[in-house]
Amino acid sequence: MTDATERRPPALVPRRDPQAVPPPPVDDTPAAPVEPRPSAEPRPPAEPERRVVTVRVRVLAAVLAATVAALAVSGWVAALLAGARVDTRIDDDLRRGAEQVRLLAADGVDPQTGGPFASAHELVLTAMSRTVPARTEGMLALEDGAVTVVAADSVVLRPEEDRELVARLADPALRTGARLVSVRTAVTDWRAAVIPVRTADVPDAAGDGTTVLVLAYDRTAERDAFVGIFRTYAAVATVAAALVAVVGWVVAGRLLRPVRLLGRTARSITDTDLSARLPVRGNDDVAELTRAFNAMLDRIQTAVGAQRALLDDVGHELRTPLTVVRGHVELMDTADPADAAETRELVLDELDRMGRLMDDLLTLATVGSPDFVRFAPHDVGALTDTVTGNVRPLGPRRWGVEARAEGTALVDAQRLTQAWLQLAANAVKFSDEGSTVLLGSRVVGDRLELWVTDEGVGIAPEDLDRVFERFARADEDDERPGAGLGLAIVAAIAHAHGGDVDVVSAPGRGSTFTVRVPLAGPPPEPAPVPAPTAGGAS
């Protein structure tokens, strides 16, 4: 089936200019053999294949690094806060001890005698006897820089044994008032409350000597008490990081499985097998990527299929006319003007047929492209009038209009005109001269129907399903011109509009071809429509 198109001029073949300079003569002398020269430099060794770090490993490494950093920072901050709290508690205990000594001196009553303290030494002894040191706390008293009073033997911490500490505490500058001092020695790190008690502080006491009461904490021992807790934290953090690594490896593998499948599918696709697709699971970003990849494969398969079909069709349909042209040209008697004229006419006719065939094939090859149809609002009645005026030159038939639709439709008017004229040309080709051919248009529901009815030879029931296939012909022995692509183009235009085309026919009673398209155009995201795998005229 072919379009009702005008005859195209034959393709022009460039002719050789007789005035052109001839090519230089070819030297037939055999050239002397050229011995290969040794390579100046040895070929560099091939680069070793680099190991590819997978996305799974990268994701897991990033997650694990973030987890370890978070745990480490959390532990470090917690250790700083715990150390600060230990120092605060030590200072609070030392201040309470100093306050108790001050209150005892302000009271001035010796609880053993019921009278005033006899000396600062007695007051310090009483204060030390009332103090119960903690496990990491010790105490002593100094007079004139020498240790005069120490804690009971039940007290574990013995600050008097640290000579460096005693020497620092004997400094006369520390006797001016109660204070908190920090002393780091070779033994440990001390935090101490230095409380000078003078004879003048004791009411009615005799003498003028000064006794220094020292309450000391071992800060290192205090901090070691919570070091064990952070060792436990470190162990738990290590186990947590290992658990995150295991869970992250599994989760990353499940999340990236579609990506691995995508790569595997891409590697399995060849130029002969484009059928592989990825299974779509879920409704997340990965599932959307999978859908996009499958849609891309659909478009590629459609494009490759159209390309193969075009190549097959070109090879199939051009072989015969080329053979005919070659045979007649080879057998043409150039000395016989009549034979030359006849051969020229035949060659031109075959070239015209090949030109029309190429136009039809190129039209079918662009079916899957986005700009195959261009939608715009168009008046249906005006479209009917245009086609009615264009069909009369197709052939001497009694042309008529059965119905004329009114209204506006979102269609590609040029493509619909092309399809409608093709149906009219098909009716002319398969009907007798002077027979009736009727055109019509109407709106049924949300669809526009365009049809052509003829009184031609009709189509056998067994051929109705394949009349829209490429190169299909109801009668293979039919000598009417045409390659059998016209109805395939009609079907492609109808499908591109989101519609369809059908035929009602019976042998000897004519045929009615009807194109149905939506009035409002195709859906916003129409499914990809593959190019027709076959087509042709009845």
Image: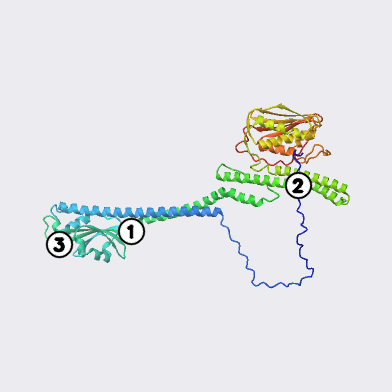
Viewer-proximal residue among 300 and 432: 432
Q: CA distance from mark 2 to mark 3?
A: 125 Å
Name the residue rendered at 76%, 65% in the picture: 24
The numbered mark at residue 209 is: 3
Q: CA distance from mark 2 to mark 1?
A: 94 Å
Q: In the image, residue 120 lies at what x, y percent?
A: 16, 58
Amino acid type of disc 2?
A: Val
**In the displayed structure, does residue 201 sit left or right of residue 180?**
left
Name the residue rendered at 30%, 53% in the picture: 88
Which residue is identified by label 1?
221
The numbered mark at residue 314 is: 2
Asked if the residue under mark 3 is in contact with the one under mark 2, i.e. CB atoms within 8 Å, the reply is no
Amino acid type of disc 3?
A: Gly
Name the residue rendered at 73%, 36% in the picture: 422
Rendered view: 119 above or below 411: below
Viewer-proximal residue among 111 and 461: 461
Rendered view: 57 above or below 355: below
Report if residue 278 is visible in the image: no
Q: Find numbered disc 3 in the image and state the secondary structure of the residue it sits on.
A: loop
The numbered mark at residue 378 is: none
**In the displayed structure, does residue 339 sit left or right of residue 149?**
right
Q: In the image, residue 243 lies at what x, y percent?
A: 50, 51
Q: In the image, residue 516 lies at what x, y percent?
A: 68, 32
**In the displayed structure, does residue 514 sit left or right of residue 231?**
right
Q: Nearer the viewer, mark 2 or mark 1?
A: 2
Q: Quadrant of residue 475?
A: top right
Q: Quadrant of the N terminus?
A: top right
Q: Nearer the viewer, mark 2 or mark 3?
A: 2
Report if residue 55 is visible in the image: yes
Amino acid type of disc 1?
A: Ala
